[in-house]
Image (cartoon, helix red, strand yellow):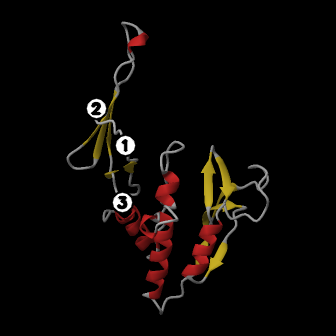
Amino acid sequence: MGTRKKVHAFVRVKPTDDFAHEMIRYGDDNKSIDIHLKKDTRRGVVNNQQTDWSFKLDGVLHDASQDLVYETVAKDVISQALNGYNGTIMCYGQTGAGKTYTMMGATENYKHRGILPRALQQVFRMIEERPTHAITVRVSYLEIYNESLFDLLSTLPYVGPSVTPMTIVENSQGVFIKGLSVHLTSQEEDAFSLLFEVR
């Protein structure tokens, strides 16, 4: 990720016991993926159903460890954020695709921790390496689900998305989420405590 592209796109393929090798092919460079579905013969003789898709990406992560995912996707974004650049890491996919596992990881095994715990660790390690800099860390956890915004650290009881209406606002200072709770953290342990509070 050393280039200055604005957006990088990676696909992480969820491992399965019965992987669909006849439907999915990876490019030799691990930067492309081809998907082929058989035509649905029940649609009759004239069938214009699309059966092939090809995607060019910055990387395809198949059977990738959490460590490899972090090194490939997130590490440079976090480093650049501490150098003054904006950065966003987001997961997108259908329910059950592995977004939560990728972002949070498995709590029962340290080596399976996800992007968020690794990012927090990296942020505070980098701060330790810069003792002469005044760096403030603020933490918020936001989920976007079905086009609704959810504050995962809200202290209000959850009744529905309308309880704590949040909106995306842009002003002279930038873009922010109005109504999103922001928590000041001075050490790694505080940030992890907030992470474990996420509901």
Query: Relative to residue 59, is residue 150 drawn left or right?
Result: right
Q: Position of residue 187 (x, y in %)?
A: 57, 83
Q: Is residue 12 above or below residue 183?
A: above
**Mark 1 against mark 2, which lies toward the viewer?**
1
Q: What's under tag 2, amino acid-wise? A: Glu
| Disc sitting over residue 22 in the figure | 2
Q: What's under tag 1, amino acid-wise? A: Asp
Q: Position of residue 171 (x, y in %)?
A: 65, 62
Q: Position of residue 168 (x, y in %)?
A: 65, 55
Residue 180 visible in this rendered orientation of the protein = yes
For disc 1, the marked residue is 17
Dot 2 alpha-carbon crowd within 10 angstroms: few under 14, some 14 to 19, many 20 or more: few
What residue appears at the point 38 percent right and 68 percent down from the top-left corner? 76
The N terminus sits in image quarter: bottom left
For disc 3, the marked residue is 65
Helix, strand or loop for disc 2: loop
Helix, strand or loop for disc 1: loop
Determine the image quadrant of residue 195.
Answer: bottom right
Q: Earlier in the sequence, mark 1 or mark 2?
A: 1
Q: What's under tag 3, amino acid-wise? A: Ser
What residue appears at the point 31 percent right and 65 percent down from the top-left corner? 2
136 and 51: which is toward the camera: 51
Query: Relative to residue 187, is residue 61 drawn left or right?
Result: left
Dot 3 alpha-carbon crowd within 10 angstroms: few under 14, some 14 to 19, many 20 or more: some
The C terminus sits in image quarter: bottom right
Q: Earlier in the sequence, mark 2 or mark 3?
A: 2
Q: Position of residue 145 (x, y in %)?
A: 62, 47
Measure the alpha-carbon separation of dots 3 and 1. Answer: 16 Å
